[in-house]
Image (cartoon, rainbow, N blue to C red):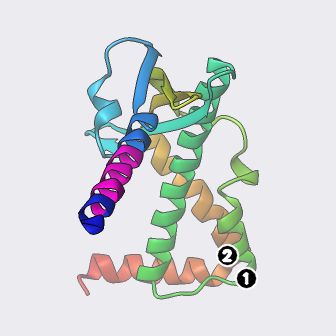
Amino acid sequence: MKYPILVSLITTLTVSCSSGTIAQRQRTLIDSSGPRPDWVSGSKVVLEDEKNLNFRSQATIRGDERLGSCMDLSRMQAQERVLTEIQTEVRGALSQAQTNPSEAAELLLTRSLSSDFQGKLRGLRTTDEYFERFQIAENERIECFTLNQIKRSDFERLKQEVINRVVAADPAVKAALSDQQAKFFKGE
């Protein structure tokens, strides 16, 4: 007789504790900048069309901080994402050319993410913004989203600037890239 009562008590405690945790973690919307746009809910970070690359970025801050700071963080994340995309493409081109850049060229490529392109990226602009202020348990948070656009031509120009800097640091990279282009046009 003691065991069914003990099992019943443990079950009751487990259910009440777990349901209390779920209730505490529920996200309650307090405020937003309007209806949630489709680009906010999507899973894609880079949205492409014929002429532009669109980068979705987001930042989350405490609820007692300024909304403008949250939007600034989201825009900076978009800049970082553009530079990361460029760095990935340059690394891919070097890999296809089957060359390993020198230590100086590698360092330059890694630094292209921060110091060489601090501030605004030429051609990158914010086309839409959205925020939500919400509460989880006792914590208020603000989540900001920005949709940032860069023309493909501006993206390619930035990528070429990075390549030019890497080539200047390591002339062997230039030879390898030139050989790769020659093989491509010869159909090899």
Magenta stretch: helix, strand or loop mostly: helix
Contact (Cβ within 8 Å) of mark 2 with mark 1: yes
Q: Magenta segment, which residues?
A: 7-18
Q: Nearer the viewer, residue 180 or 31?
A: 31
In the figure, 63 relative to 117: above or below?
above
**Residue of label 2:** 106
Callout 1: helix, strand or loop? helix
Quarter of the picture holding the N terminus: bottom left
Residue 106 coordinates in the image, percent (x, y): 67, 75
Q: Is residue 3 left or right of residue 86?
A: left
Q: Does residue 178 appear anywhere in the picture?
A: yes
Circle 1 is placed at which residue position? 103
x, y percent for residue 68: 64, 19
**Left or right: where does residue 17 sit relative to residue 163?**
left
Q: Which residue sits at x=46%, y=36%? A: 24
Q: Above or below — where is 122 with respect to 71? A: below
